[in-house]
Image (tube, helix red, strand yellow):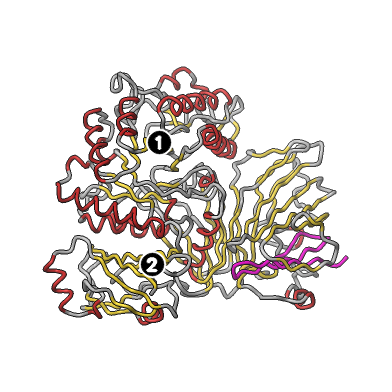
Amino acid sequence: MSPSVVHLTSAGVSLVLRIHPTGLPEVTHWGRALGDLTADELQLACSVAEQAPTASGADARIPLTIVPEHGDGWFGRPGVVGSREGTAWSPRFAVVETAIGGRVLDSGETVSHGPGGLRILARDEWAELELELDIALEDSGIVTMQAALRNTSAAPYRLEALRLVLPVPTYASEGMDFAGRWGNERWPQRFDVRYGLHARESRRGRTGLDAALMLCVGTPGFGFRHGEVWSLHVGFSGNHEHYLERTSSGSVLGGGELLLPGEITLGSGDEYRSPLVYAAYGTGLDGVASRHHTSLRARPGHPRSPRPVTLNVWEAVYFDHDFDKLSQLASAASELGVERFVLDDGWFLGRRNDRAGLGDWTPDPAVWPNGLDPLVSLVTGLGMQFGIWVEPEMVNADSDVARAHPDWIMRARDTLPIEGRHQQVLDLTNPAAYEYLHDRLTTLLSDSRIRYLKWDHNRDLVEAGSGRDLTPAVHRQTLATYRLMAELRAAHPGLEIESCSSGGGRVDRGVIEHTDRVWASDNMDPLDRMRIMTGTGMLLPPELVGSHVASPVSHTTGRTHSLPFRAAVAFIGHFGIEWDLTTASPEELAELAAWIQRYRHARDLLHTGEVVNGDRSGQDAAVRGVVSADGARALFTVIAAEHSPDATMRLRLPGLEAAARYRVQAEMPGMTEEEMSAIDAVGAYGLFSPTPVTLPGSILMTSGVEIPAMRPETAVLVHLERV
């Protein structure tokens, strides 16, 4: 029987699959669009070369299938790892049926299609296993993959891993992913691709502050705007893995859930479904990010209302909740134009510090003798939404719920795991614990007109066992969290949830399907936030990333920065404030109000346009902007982090239309008249003068304009409009 060939193409990307009935599908091309191909050309494009026989190699070609198999002679990581008490440990699947758009393909059929999805059913009759593969190319050009493994035997099957891979060309010889820690998330790190395995594993029970976020590989020296880049992201908030593997048979990007020993045992007829894996090809890192942004914005549930200016009171009051102080903050926020007021940690029973109270989700009568309603009424009466902080998955040992139900705490033995931030993990796989939590949160939302939950998750999952047998349960805990979020949102239309996890510890496309934004980091120092926001933006568009103006002295680093610098760094995101406004001067409040008005005026562009980044040849300035979908408008932030060694620097603004002409106006908030006069005196093509200049996009993108070197820790906004 001859193989079928399927060519999917969309948004400048082609995915070509060779589907042979005696094995699993191979991807023979994933990357730049191939254009319109005839059936003969497609067959030729999908042709595969037989490897030359060697003294010690296999006598047949080793295929690079989407789920690699040891039985094919693939000596890299296998796609399915498991056994049935030592048997069925090397499955060899054969395709039974392939359907595209619900239509079953004939054997040997050649199909060209735009965006679309394939469903492939394969079986191993000897191992008594079924494998279902869902592979799709979205309108955005993103490839999504998901697999389901079913046990068709009467005997149980213990699954250890189910991985999905895509091939990448060997000339893609430079890799990049991310690392980090608390307050310092998403550091990019590059490496040369060598033979062997580059693996990033998260065993933290959450995405992780040190998470890879995505694994990229590209042509040497790729940047934001140049080079070919292939990338892979596992959309799951529990344990997971990303890896790049190069062997003599080829290179693959792969990933999936990282299962704990014995975590998945399939009984007769049972099924395990993998997380979605997202693969993006693009020109430069901006090309990859743009595909994820387009994909996320196309979802039916994507937030489309204007993203409200948010005030979070954590750095203003910490655990010291006082109605009078909070009332002053609410009044000050309302006068500035804030649209959402969020009460952070410290409102519930016994919560005067981080050592007690988690799990007792009832307003503390010692602080709130009349409940939360007086504050909620005040906030909503001022025209703002009311939000509140919760950490549902965690519990303090010093809490009523932990004392009453110690069996609700996850553990792997008869003693408790080590604590993290003085807390343990509440077992959401326990039906009683789940129902308790569901009821408490439902009561909170029903009684208090709360429209927003800042949902935190402040510790890694260590020894996360469940039930009387204390079996590993990170997989089930993650799915239970998703279910709880989904049920609360369904029961309370309009409720929004923020994913916070010690800051940016739960940032992935699994949790974002159940939330409306993420908290990128607890660190709001603008020098660090420049990088954190850029890294987070590789996956998420600005409207999904909380980005706040914090206190003049950073809570995390102790550094002091001007208000214009703090605000400019926070601007391209979901804008907000984390500052005790009662300590701000009248001048600072007026300046902050002006920034809020800038954001409210620009958010329709910021939250719908394409994010672009300037490739930096030195440390002069970071250029980050948003260009409208039709190319008619753009807004850039030009941020100088360090002192430039040069007297002038050349400013290039990427992502514009080369043939269009743009009216360009620079805005320098916070700059004194003397500084403005000094800059205006050197000319700089009038870019920084009060009178706008008009230039073609080709000059702005390619040659750029020369401007005076900016002082360290200053920022400029550049507004463009097509004329």
* Residue 669: percent from left, percent from top: 22, 61
Q: Nearer the viewer, mark 1 or mark 2?
A: 2
Number of numbered callouts drawn? 2
Q: Residue furthest left?
A: 674
Q: Which residues are magenta?
A: 1-27
> Residue 303, how many percent across, how many down?
48, 48
**Relative height, residue 467 to residue 196 (above, below):** above
Residue at 66% in and 52% down: 146
Provide the residue designation for mark 2. 634
Reply above or below: 230 against 411.
below
Q: Residue at x 28, y 23 (%)?
A: 367
Along the viewing direction, whichever of 451 and 464 lies nearer the viewer:
451
Q: Is residue 582 left or right of residue 695?
A: left
> What residue type is disc 2 on?
Ala
The answer, for residue 515, to whether it is visible in the render is yes
Q: Is residue 5 magenta?
A: yes
Whether 505 is drawn above or below 77: the answer is: above
According to the image, label 1 marks what residue? 420
Q: Secondary structure at mark 2?
A: strand
Look at the image and tell me in which quarter the N terminus lies: bottom right
In the image, residue 285 lies in the stretch drawn in magenta? no
Left/right of residue 576 with respect to residue 479 in the rendered view = left
Q: Which residue type does callout 1 highlight?
A: Gly
Front one among 634 and 95: 634
In the rendered image, the residue lying farthest to the front is 723
**Around disc 2, counting alpha carbons within 10 Å, would you say few (fewer than 14), some (14 to 19), or many (20 or more)?**
many
Which label's residue is closer to the chain start, 1 or 2?
Answer: 1
Q: Going by the picture, which residue comes out furthest to the right?
A: 1
Decide which of 155, 474 is in the foreground and name it: 474
**Residue at horizontal 25%, vertical 35%?**
317
* Left or right of residue 38: residue 631: left
Residue 123 x, y percent position in the rendering: 81, 51
